[in-house]
Image: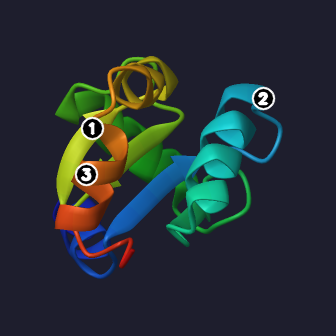
């Protein structure tokens, strides 16, 4: 878990993903289209990916993938990100985290 804490504090937006996950692709596309430029860790392509996935489950991510952190805070998965978007609070959250400047 210490590894995850360090990783999510390095960038305003961090996504833990798998390259074959369609929901991960959707979240990445949405955030990139806003201009957020997230750090993306494809857990099926990085060393210790399985260990990171288990740590995400222990943090309460269910399912573990995708897991989105904004401003160092766990937002959740695709459902939570889409809910924030639909209720109009995703962009302000990205701005507060320093992921968007406009």
What element does badge 3 sit on? Answer: helix
- Cα–Cα span, label 2 and label 1: 18 Å
Judge from the rendering whether residue 90 lies leftward or rightward of residue 33; answer left or right.
left
- Quick one: label 1, few (<14), some, or many (20+) residues within 10 Å? some
Of badges 3 and 1, the one in the foreground is 3
Q: Which residue is mark 3?
A: 92
Q: Which mark is residue 22?
A: 2
N-term-proximal mark, 2 vs 3: 2
Judge from the rendering whether residue 54 lies leftward or rightward of residue 21; answer left or right.
left
Of badges 2 and 3, the one in the foreground is 3
Residue 65 versus residue 46: which sits nearer the camera?
A: 65
Q: Which residue is mark 1?
A: 75
Q: Which mark is residue 45?
A: none
N-term-proximal mark, 2 vs 1: 2
Judge from the rendering whether residue 80 lies leftward or rightward of residue 27; answer left or right.
left
- Quick one: label 2, few (<14), some, or many (20+) residues within 10 Å? few
Residue appearing at x 33%, y 21% in the figure? 87
Observer able to see residue 42: no
Q: Position of residue 99 (x, y in %)?
A: 36, 72
Q: Position of residue 14 (x, y in %)?
A: 41, 61
Residue 7 versus residue 53: which sits nearer the camera?
A: 7
Observer able to see residue 48: yes
Placement of 22 over or under 48, stated as above or below: above
């Amino acid at each position: 878990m210490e590894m995850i804490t360090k990783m999510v504090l390095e960038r305003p937006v961090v996504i833990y993903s798998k390259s074959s996950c369609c929901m991960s692709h959707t979240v990445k596309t949405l955030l990139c289209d806003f201009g957020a430029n997230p750090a993306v860790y494809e857990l099926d392509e990085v060393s210790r990916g399985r260990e990171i996935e288990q740590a995400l489950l222990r943090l309460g991510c269910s399912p573990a993938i995708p897991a989105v952190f904004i401003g160092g805070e766990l937002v959740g998965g695709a459902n939570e990100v889409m809910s924030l978007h639909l209720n109009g609070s995703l962009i302000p959250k990205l701005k507060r985290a320093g992921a968007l400047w406009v």
